[in-house]
Amino acid sequence: MENVILSEKIQVERKQFFFDLKENPRGRFLKITEDVGGRRDTIIVPSTGLEQVREVIERAIAANAAVETQPVEAAG
């Protein structure tokens, strides 16, 4: 049996993402589900890996921000 600790949903463009922090007899985990037009894909991240995932997401956000602030070069 799974116990839901936290459940959140976000909409990004045409995709919905579900974030469910759950616990079962084997431990806690984050279940991330992407729904695009009824097609669902899911990954499970054990709670022991959440900090690592957060660090990678923070680096991706910083890299994205850096790319957005770079000037666009004119085609020559």
Image: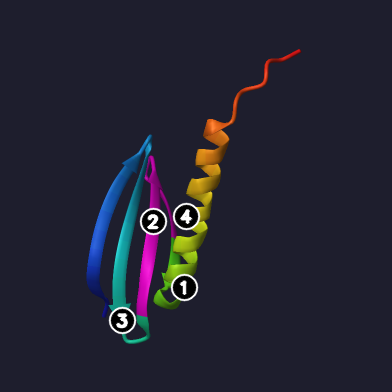
Which residue is more in the foreground, 32 or 48?
A: 48
Q: Label 4 is placed on what type of residue?
A: Glu
Q: Mark 1 or 4 closer to N-term? A: 1
Residue 24 numbered mark, or none: 3
Report the amino acid beneath label 3: Asn
**Residue 35 belongs to the span the image colors magenta:** yes
Q: Quadrant of residue 42?
A: bottom left
The dot on residue 33 is 2
In this rendering, the label closer to the viewer, 4 or 2: 4
For label 3, the SS is: strand
Callout 1 amino acid: Gly
Which residues, given as a range, are shown in magenta? 28-42
Circle 1: element type: helix
Closer to the chain start, of discs 1 and 3, is 3
Give the residue pinned by disc 4: 58
Choose between 37 and 12: the one closer to the eye: 12
Spatial distance from mark 1 to mark 4, Cα to Cα? 14 Å
For residue 28, above or below residue 11: below
Q: Label 3 near label 2: C-beta < 8 Å?
A: no
Q: Label 4 vs label 3: CA separation? A: 28 Å
Give the spatial CA distance, label 4 vs label 2: 20 Å
Q: Specify which label sits upstream in the sequence, 2 or 1.
A: 2
- Mark 4 and mark 2 lie on one chain; the one further toward the N terminus is 2
Percent coordinates x, y for residue 23 in the rendering: 30, 78
Of pointers 2 and 3, the one earlier in the residue sequence: 3
Determine crowd level at label 1: few under 14, some 14-19, many 20+ residues with C-alpha closer than 10 A. few
